């Protein structure tokens, strides 16, 4: 019974998100330069004393905190569906500063070799969850069921199981110091230092997650009941202010890994 209700609720959030796109297109047709600010630090909307092993914090990143109304609607959906969660956002510069301050110099050096923002975001998300714990959501991902219920108080981790049973990294939840995330981090750093691929998906993205964790007993949840991607927004709304566009286009033009040690361009 509960799974049926949860499925209907999840589908409802997806349908609602798709409906808002019509309004978002109309809004930016009238006000093409209007943008909304994502907060970098925001307390929970509701305070509840219940303890969870996974800290009740949502982490997100983007190339800018100034976003279109579609992306802002997506943000609001996550806040409203998970009112007991705090919110943390980091832009490109803050990501680099966080890694430099919290990890050894060789980790920051590897991160600095990445020229594509999506690859930087891939590494940052596992590092921030390993250090502090919480829930990572892509900027276009939204909860399809309240996170506190979807994750529960006793889990140490939760990964999205996508189509055909593959893991995806647009949603990840973890307690600090998760050894499974440590495996993912080591695999990413190895790929970067060897310049193993110019395909971000394989270098730092879901391909790494599946190779590192696919045969292990990790806690997973179906994406259809937990978290959707792209319901409220799309490539236009996400990258309208970015000159390089989405990472799939950028990686066709420049190598994903540079030889030097300066953080490159960012598209997320």
Image (cartoon, rainbow, N blue to C red):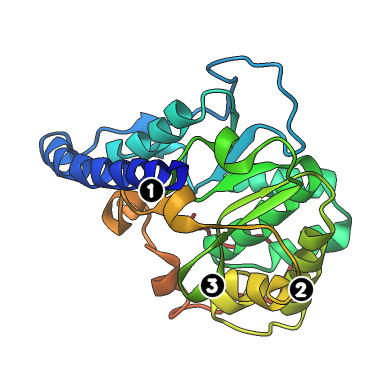
Asked where in the image residue 205 lies, by quadrant, the reply is: bottom right
Which label's residue is closer to the chain start, 1 or 3?
A: 1
Q: Please give left or right for residue 1 compared with residue 95 in the image.
A: left
Q: Residue sitting at 25 percent across and 32 percent down? A: 34
In the image as oriented, which residue stretches furthest toward the right? 104
Quarter placement of the N terminus? top left
> Which mark is nearer the camera, 3 or 2?
3
Which label's residue is closer to the chain start, 3 or 2?
A: 3
Q: Residue sitting at 78 percent across and 50 percent down? A: 130
- Mark 2 crowd level (few <14, some 14–19, many ≥20, 10 Å Cα): some
Kindly identify which residue carries mark 3. Answer: 165
Q: Position of residue 105 (x, y in %)?
A: 87, 57
Kindly identify which residue carries mark 1. Answer: 7
Q: Secondary structure at mark 3?
A: helix
Kindly identify which residue carries mark 2. Answer: 187
Determine whether 1 is above or below 199 in the image.
above
> Which mark is nearer the camera, 1 or 3?
1
Q: Secondary structure at mark 2?
A: helix
* Badge 1 vs badge 3, beta-carbon distance below 8 Å: no
Q: Secondary structure at mark 1?
A: helix
Q: Please give left or right for residue 259 compared with residue 29 in the image.
A: right
Q: Residue sitting at 64 percent across and 16 percent down? A: 48
The one nearer the camera, 265 or 78, is 78
């Amino acid at each position: 019974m509960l799974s049926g209700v949860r499925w209907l609720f999840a589908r409802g959030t997806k349908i609602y998100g798709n409906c808002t796109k019509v309004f978002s297109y109309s809004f930016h047709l009238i006000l093409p330069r209007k943008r909304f600010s994502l907060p970098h630090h925001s307390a929970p909307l509701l305070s509840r004393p219940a303890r969870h092993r996974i800290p009740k914090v949502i982490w997100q990143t983007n190339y800018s905190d100034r976003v279109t109304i579609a992306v802002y609607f997506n943000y609001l959906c996550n806040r409203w569906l998970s009112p007991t969660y705090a919110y943390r956002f980091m832009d490109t510069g803050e990501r680099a500063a966080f890694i430099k301050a919290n990890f050894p110099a060789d980790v920051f050096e590897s991160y600095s070799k990445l020229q594509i923002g999506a690859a930087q975001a891939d590494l940052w998300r596992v590092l921030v969850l390993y250090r502090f714990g919480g829930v990572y959501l892509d900027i276009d991902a939204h909860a399809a069921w309240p996170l506190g219920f979807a994750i529960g108080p006793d889990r140490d981790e939760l990964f999205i199981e996508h189509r055909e049973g593959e893991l995806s990294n647009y949603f990840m939840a973890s307690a600090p110091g998760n050894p499974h995330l440590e495996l993912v981090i080591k695999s990413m750093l190895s790929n970067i230092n060897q310049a193993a691929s110019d395909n971000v998906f394989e270098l730092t993205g879901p391909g790494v997650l599946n190779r590192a964790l696919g045969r292990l007993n990790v806690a997973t949840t179906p994406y259809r009941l937990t978290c959707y991607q792209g319901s409220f927004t799309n490539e236009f709304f996400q990258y309208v202010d970015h000159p390089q566009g989405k990472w799939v286009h950028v990686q066709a033009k420049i190598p994903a890994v540079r030889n030097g040690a300066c953080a490159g361009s960012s598209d997320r």
